[in-house]
Image (tube, rainbow, N blue to C red):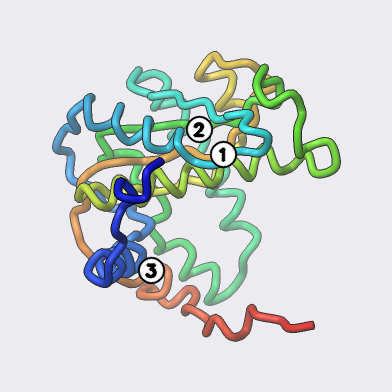
Amino acid sequence: MNNSNLPDFDDAFRQKFDSLVQWRRDVRRFKTDPIDSALLDQLIEQACLSPSVGNCQPWRFVLVANPACRAGIRENFMRRNKDALAEYAGGRAALYAKLKLAGLDAAPVHLAVFADPETPYGHGLGRRTMPEMLQYSVVGAIQTFWLAARARGLGVGWVSILDPAPVNAALEVPAVWKLIAYLCIGYPEEEHDDPELARAGWQDRIDPSAFVFRR
């Protein structure tokens, strides 16, 4: 590429990017307004620009529109959420019971994202010693999708309280595919620059210095 064609990531862009990261929230409260299918296609295309180990491109995206499939996912969530609640006691259990942990009912778009361990691409490069890198590659694509969606005013919620195997069966995808994320997508009903779990008193943000170690 000619250097004259290189993008100019100036201070104004960096400030906007910082704001984008700050406002990328895990959304659970959605408006029911529909989302243009062309916009979804564009977001998925951008996600596919993400790096992947050995360029194996293991991500598999499943748009879930069938009402029966969605009902099965919701039942799965309700069952596992009940199990999760039983793991807590006292005040923590009472607080957990009040949390809104998914936007399955209102979100106009449901997107399941899988990692295909049998991807025919990449020839195994980089994952013979660390096979988990294949799944991490899909996580990177999800983050790209998330930021791109937020830049267009959309919110994304990651539903993790699910039993993966029934999701594969409900969506009729290969059993070998690994569920990485079930995403709810739509325009946010509320806008916040802090995590909902922090506002609810579940867990505050920790200063980043607590996670940095020097050797």
Q: Which mark is residue 113?
A: 2
Dot 2, how many residues are within 10 Å of its Cα: few (below 14), some (14-19), or many (20+)? many
Question: How far, Cα to Cα, is label 1 from label 2?
Answer: 8 Å
- Residue at 28%, 39% (x, y): give it: 107
Q: Do the CB atoms of the residues marked 1 and 2 lie less than 8 Å apart?
A: yes
Percent coordinates x, y for residue 210 in the rendering: 62, 84
Nearer the camera: disc 1 or disc 2: 1
What residue do we see at 52% from left, 19% from top? 170
Say if 147 sits above or below 185 in the image.
below
**3D distance between C-alphas at marks 1 and 3:** 23 Å
Density class for disc 1 (Cα within 10 Å; few <14, some 14-19, many ≥20) is many
- Which is nearer the eye, 67 or 42? 42
Element class at badge 3? loop
Q: Which mark is residue 195?
A: 3
Q: Which residue is mark 1?
A: 138
Q: Which quadrant, please, contains the C terminus?
A: bottom right
Verify CB contact (< 8 Å) between mark 1 and mark 3.
no
- Left or right of 78 on screen, residue 124: right
Residue flagged by tag 2: what amino acid is it?
Answer: Val
Please state the horizontal and vertical placement of residue 38, each as a whole percent of the image.
Answer: 22, 25
In whole angstroms, how far apart are the C-alphas of marks 2 and 3?
A: 23 Å
Q: Considering only vertical position in the picture, is 31 above or below 36? A: below
In the image, 53: left or right of 158? right
Q: Quadrant of residue 87?
A: bottom right
Regarding mark 1 in the picture, which secondary structure is present there? helix
The quarter of the picture where residue 25 lies is bottom left
Classify residue 46 as left or right of residue 84: left
Where disc 2 sits, the SS reads: strand
Give left or right: position of 204 versus 128.
Answer: left
